Structures are given as C-alpha cells and as structure tokens.
Amino acid sequence: MRPDILNPLFAELTSLKGIGPGLAKPLGRLGLARIVDALFHLPTGVIERKAVAELDEADVGRMILVTLTARDYRSVGSSRAPFRIEAFDGVGNHVSIVYFGRNTGWARKLFPLGEARRVAGRLDRFGDALQIVHPDMVEPVDSEVSIALREPVYPLSEGLTNARMADIAAQALERAPELDEWADAGLVAREEWLGWRPALAAAHAEPDDARARDRLAYDEMFAGQLAWMLVRQSLKARRGHPVTGDRRLRDMLKLPFAPTGAQRRSMDEIEGDLAQDTPMLRLLQGDVGSGKTIVALDALLTAVEAGKQGALLAPTEILARQHFATLQAMLVGMPVNLAVLTGRDKGKVREATLMGLADGSIDILIGTHAIFQEAVTYRDLAVTVIDEQHKFGVAQRLLLTQKASRPPHLLVMTATPIPRTLLLSNYGEMDVSRLDEMPPGRTPVDTRIIGSARLDEVVDALGRHIDAGKQAYWVCPLVEESDAVDLGSAEERAASLKQRFGDRIGLVHGRMKGPDKDAVMEAFSRGETSVLVATTVIEVGVDVPNASLIVIESADRFGLAQLHQLRGRVGRGAEKSVCLLVRGEALSESAKARLTMMRETNDGFRIAEADLELRGSGEVLGTRQSGEAGYRVATPEQLQRLLPLAHDDARLFIDRDGGIAGKRGEAARTCLYLFERDAAVPLLRGG
Ligand code: ADP
Ligand code: MG
C-alpha cells in the first residue's frame, strides 16, 4: 500500500482551490491530472518584468508592469480585426491594448473605461504607436493579487495561462510533504544536494537551478533503476518454462526470403534463453523494417511446438490488428490457432476467446494490454512478446500481473534504436539482441530538405505522386504545445489539400477517438485515400508499402529520433521512396545539424547516437518528457550524466543496505511509490 504521507499527492488537481473541471482538459493535454503530475511539471524559463511608472521608461520588446487607464474601445471593420483598448499611463503616454478574437466582452470587463489597472505584458511597437498584445495579467490597482516581477514560465496548453499554472504549482508544493532521504548520504553530501522537498521548491522557483533539477532527475532515475533491478532479481530467482521446440512448426513456415544474419543470430540467442529454467528477459532492438516480426514469431512458435502458449502485446488497437493479420497470413494452412483480443472485443466474441485461452485451444494471442487483464487466464503461457514498448514500467507491471507461479519468457521489441548509453535507463539490465543488418534489397529513402517558402512545389510534387497511383503521408507537428507558435495545424493542412485533391485526403490526429482513428487508417491502408495527413500519431503506426512519399512539415521542430521513426513509414515497398523535410526559415545550429544528419544517413543507430548529442533543452517537440524512456523530469542529457550514479546507488541499496529493513529501505519504498514504480515494491525484501 502507498504510504499515507504520499496520498495527498495523488489527489486530483481539481481538488485544488479554484481549479474547476473546465481546466481538466487543458491540464490533461499536458499529462497533468494529479497533484504529483503538477509537482513534476517544472518551469522551463523565467519572465523578468520591469516595473515602470511611465511608458517612455520602458524598452520596446521588454516585459513590463505598468499602471494604465482605458479611455476608449475600438473594434473597427470586420470581425477579424483585433479589438483595441486605447489606454494611457499616469503622464498621458498612449498605448493600445490589443485582443484578437470575436468575444470582446471579457476584455471590456478587464478594462472598464476610466479605471486604472496594473498591466503586465510585452511592450511592442506597431507603426508609430505602442501596443501590448494580450497582456499576461491585468489587475485592479487595489487587488490582492500581486504581479511578480520575476515569474517562472511553464509549458502550457490552450486554455491554461501561466499565472494559473503557477498557482497550481504553488498549491501543489504546499501539499508536498518532507520525505526521508532515500539517496545514499555520502552521495547527497558530495553532490551538495537539497532534500527532495526543498529541491522541488527550488526547481519551481528558479528554473536555472541545475543542482535542484539534477537532484529530482536523480530521484526519478533511482526509482527506475531500483525497480528494474528488483524485477530482474525476482524474475531470475523464479522457475519459468524451459521450452525447447522440435522445429515442426517453424519448418513449415514458408517464408519468401532467407533470414538475415542478424535475424538468425537473434533467433539463436532467444532459443538459448527459452531453453533455460529461468525466464528470459530480453530486448530485441531493430530499426523499422529490420524484420523483428519473424524473430518474434519464431519465439512464439517455439512455445507452441512445446505444447504451450504465446502472447504478443501491441501498443495500440491498430497495431494489434495489423500484427494479427500479418501473422495469420504467414501461418495459413498451419495447425496454429491464432486469436486477437483488444479492449474493443466484448460479449460473446470475448467470452469465446477467454475460453480458448483457458482451455489451451488458442495457441497464440495477439492484442493490446487487454490480454493481461485479471479476467484473462492462460492454460500455459510460456512466451510473451511486447512490441514497440515505449512506456517505462509497462514491462515491470506486466511481469507482476502474471499471477502464474511460473512467469513466462519475456521478449521486448523496440524500433527505437536506443544508444547503448540509454539502454540501461530504459530497460534496466535486460539482455539485448540487435538487428543491425537490414534485409537485402532495400533502397535507402531519398531525403531532401526544402524551405517552407516552396510549399507550393511540394504540393505539386504530391499531386504528381498520387496521380501515379501512389500514396503519401503528410505529417504536421502538434499544435497544442504552444499556441504562440504558428504551426500549420493538421486540420488546416488537410482542409487546404482537400480543396485541391478532394476526398483522396484522409486526416488522423491524436485527439480523435479510437474507432474513428482506426477507420481513417484502415481506409488509407486499403488505398481508398491517397494521402494521410497526420500528426505524429503515425509514428508507431501503419505498414502501407504503397506509401512511398512522406512530407514532414516544420521538420526542424522534431527531434532526430522522431524524424527517423516517421521516415521509417516509407521505404517499405519495392518503390524508391522520398522524404521531404520542410523547414522553417530561421534555424538554430542544432536544427540544421539534425536535418543534415537525416539527409546523410538512414542508419538508425547512428542517428540515435547523434540525437543524444544534439538534443538541447526543450528546443525540440516531444523531448521534454524524454519520450521513449517515460521520464518526466530527467532530460536525455541528465540521463547520460547521472544514470551511472543512480544505477550504482540502487545496486548499493540492494546489496549493502538490503531491502526494506532499516530507515533507508522505508524511504526507498516511498520513492518507488512517488514515481509510480510501485509494481516493484512487493519485491523489496521483507516488503
Ligand atoms: P519491423 O517490425 O522490424 O519494422 P517487419 O518485421 O515488419 O519489420 O519486416 C519488414 C518487412 O521486411 C516485412 O515485409 C518482412 O516480410 C520483410 N522481411 C523481414 N525479414 C526479411 C528478410 N530476411 N529478407 C527480406 N525481407 C524480409
Ligand atoms: Mg514491427
């Protein structure tokens, strides 16, 4: 059970003062639901405001705090023109307060004519006049709310202001208790770290406080390392299913190709593991298209040959169904009973599948996490394969939900070519097989970089491409990261392409509901639509060999690993594929380096190493939550620098300080709960 002291942190954010259900959505988009989420949602910068009495003391372009009085409203012309409030400072200098949008009622309420207001915002010049567009804060002069001159800046989403987020963080901090130290005392002293609670407060107050951030990142890594070690230790201490197949099924497989050397080596390694008494814990690492599927199938069939069952866990409904179709086609005419189970299967179909699993008539089950729910019992599950498993903790949880006295062998497959330095952070001490050799006959994707000014040419090229009967992806970045940044949203892009190409355009994005999303994807994979406009949801998506063009808009805003994953959607058929990276105008050095790297190589492992070196702090979409690793505090840079410390300390904790006994044990247990690695808690000795 979670220690009582942590309970307040797992309450909903809507239990905070002034946080209504209306904010749940914008908060949810940032992954913030509970107090603990807000605690680890750290600011990325600060606003420094200059308090001025008169506007001519202020520099254009600076954030200022000034008292202004509204004299007049102006909303001229069309409804699209901005609403202007003509305001003056104490000595009669004029400034326009500008609001975009149709509903101006609330702006009038903020600035009643003739009343003084304290206004915080950025002073800009428009023509000859001064203006402040959408002030950050507006308060009556006698208001109790103070406007800070220095304020941390949080990552936001539409509908959530920085002031509101800061208030949430402050309230969350008030609820954060002091916790006993779980890190090694010597380490804490050497690094001059604050305790967890003070470090958290410092990281919120002062985004540049590197030491406080290191401390928090360390805690997260320590919890992760400890959890992996405990899982591995407990797993390796248990008896599993020694499985040796007689090859009767594998020999029946009629593959149209010979396995590559890397596939053969991986299959041998897996076969060796399966024959052991202790359960396998192995990561199969291979770039998109490297041929992981037949390696997985080989392991599953080995279990079936031995009279046992196998299961394949996919991260999404679509992928589960796609795997099912692929394997079914490969196994046609063979005495192997395959079934699929996802959250969507209900009623009789589901019942029948559950029966088949329990009585052993189903040999291999493919599905989403629904395949490991309480109600699902296997007669004799010996091999579990997890595909494209990104979320840290899933494997751990999975291992522990295996109520069976003998845990199955576990093979985790990932298409993220994680550099060796990060393997440990993401997967603990797993054994690793690498598919570092591509199947023959692949032509590398031809990658080109194009300025956004030439978007028309890109659209023309797209037209020629689909007129030739081929298909294409068009990827737009997510808009919700920041509404200040002007990115072509997927919806707008789809609408404009539709004007030209009609219903040959499909659109899929992250906010669509499962079944709707699937329908669009399926229409594309059947060739009913020619272009799939998508946000990054296609990253772990579909396999459509006829799609041989991918356009990635604002490519400079994506991380290297992401670009590589996206590009992997094409180059799957015989056709030569093209990837067009559309770049913005002003590029940072690291953005340039990323795009150049993409143009120069198709080698996922090389790209992954470069990615690690190039990633700046928060510059790139999707890096804040160090993605595949599932870390929310630790950055890739911190992982690289501090992981060895966390690893060694976790080892020390287990070997020297031994389990839960003693004060450090209690604290470490709390740490596991805090970072939600609690699936590992029962494995603490005496825990
Ligand atoms: P991954 O899951 O690693 O992205 P897949 O297993 O889907 O890759 O394989 C990609 C494609 O390559 C499939 O069409 C598959 O049939 C084919 N393939 C796999 N192994 C080989 C091989 N050794 N030779 C030729 N083609 C192969
Ligand atoms: Mg695959």
Image (cartoon, rainbow, N blue to C red):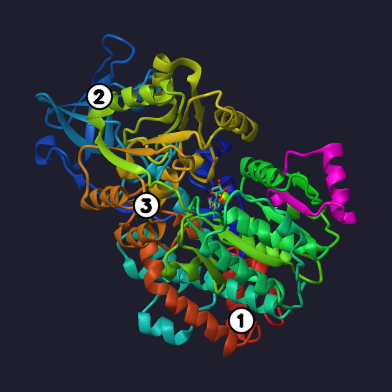
* Mark number displayed over residue 665: 1
**Disc 2: CA contacts within 10 A as few (<14), some (14-19) or many (>=20):** many
Mark 3 or 1: in front is 3
Residue at (73, 38) in percent of width and height: 344
Secondary structure beneath label 3: loop
Secondary structure beneath label 2: strand
* Mark number displayed over residue 70: 2
Q: Is residue 5 left or right of residue 191?
A: right
The x and y percentages for residue 164 are 43, 43
User: Up-down: is 579 above or below 499?
Assistant: below
Q: Amino acid at mark 2?
A: Ala
Label count reads 3
Label 3: which residue?
602
Query: Closer to the N terminus: mark 3 or mark 2?
Result: 2
Q: Is residue 626 magenta?
A: no
The x and y percentages for residue 660 are 65, 82
Q: Is residue 367 magenta?
A: yes
